[in-house]
Amino acid sequence: MQNLDATFAALADSTRRAILMRLAKGESTVMELAKPFKMSQPAISRHLKVVEQAGLVSTTIRAQERPRRIETAPLKKATDWIEKYRLMWEKRYEALDGLLEELQMIQTRGDRQK
Amino acid sequence: MKTDPKELKIELRGETEVLMTRYFAAPRQLVFDCHTKPDLMRRWLIGPPGMVLDIREHDLKAGGKYLYVYSDARGNAMGVHGKFIEVRTPERVANTENYAMDMAAFDAHAPEDPNATIESRTFTSEGNLTLVTHVSKYASSEIRKMVLESGAADGWVPCYQELDKLLLEVA
């Protein structure tokens, strides 16, 4: 299981996002990946390593080729998490409003009985 | 107050922080209790739909650990864990926050991620209201950017845009 921090850190760079966008269209070799960038192949390889370590890209071994492939599961997990987080806080705070109201009513009633 | 006091406001502070503020119509001590007493926390710290909160560990003191697990009927479980850094009743609580997306792989004794997000909640009385200031301090500006990128306009990230685009292409 890959952690979210690794996913977010890997996505925090425009070159790496561009690599992922390219791989989203289909698998590709490192040489093909490097072509659109004004960057050396070793520089691209370093970026690839980051996305690979985050579990976002895997390598297929096929004869002489080593094409890279995108792995979508960690990405889905990351978007799901963010969306859930936002909705969660709005819902939580609404629930807290209700709870506070209830607790204060109990308190007021208790005070009156004193 | 001109605006709706119960509006959830989110803003950025410095390079790495996200500030969330929200007013509650209750005295400070009560709002603090709701954030720190397990019986009360369980009532409102709702998780993802269909998931229930189990407060497995909650050692409310500086250095004390906590582990909250959200689980559903199908056996999915996700944990939030860390340790308290500061506890000042009824003013402030700060803690580290880590997510265990897979509880089966969770190791309570593993060393904590040095890049853990630091969460703090400060409680301030303002007349009859209590202001809760919730600060998330991320390990780097890049990580914060990731979390927030598309959310500046309406306060929070409805979704992460780049990721969305990517997922659309993959789908």
Image (cartoon, rainbow, N blue to C red):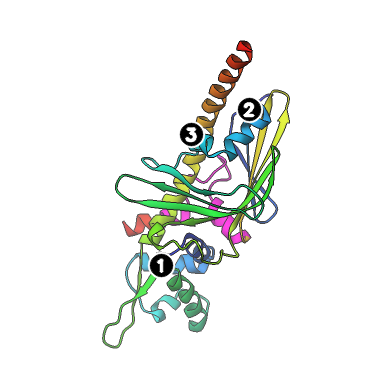
Q: Amino acid at mark 3?
A: Arg
Q: Residue at x 56, y 64 (%)?
A: B113
| Closer-to-camera residue (A84/B93) | B93
| Dot 3: element | helix
Q: Residues within 10 Å of mark 2 (few under 14, many from 20)?
A: some
Q: Which region shows up in magenta?
A: B141-166
Q: Are marks 2 and 3 in contact (CB under 8 Å)?
A: no
Mark 2, mark 3: which one is toward the viewer? Answer: 3
Q: Residue at x 64, y 13 (%)?
A: A114
| Dot 1: element | loop
What chain does mark 2 sit on?
B
| Mark 1 and mark 3: Cα distance apart in space | 37 Å
Q: Residues within 10 Å of mark 1 (few under 14, many from 20)?
A: many
Magenta stretch: residue B127 in it?
no
Q: Position of residue B163 (x, y in %)?
A: 44, 56
Query: Which quadrant is the N terminus of chain B positioned in?
Result: top right
| Closer-to-camera residue (B84/A78) | B84
Q: Which is nearer the N-term, disc 2 or disc 3? A: 2
Judge whether A112 appears above or below A6 on screen. Answer: above
| Mark 2 and mark 1: Cα distance apart in space | 42 Å
For label 1, the residue is A56
Image quadrant in which you'd find residue A19: bottom left
Q: Position of residue B9 (x, y in %)?
A: 61, 37
Describe residue A12's horizontal placement relative to residue B90 as left or right.
Answer: left
Q: Which mark identifies residue B5?
A: 2
What chain does mark 1 sit on?
A
Is there any visible trace of residue A91 in the rendered image? no
For label 3, the residue is B43
Query: Which quadrant is the C terminus of chain B positioned in?
Result: bottom left
Mark 1, mark 3: which one is toward the viewer? Answer: 3
Q: Amino acid at mark 2?
A: Pro
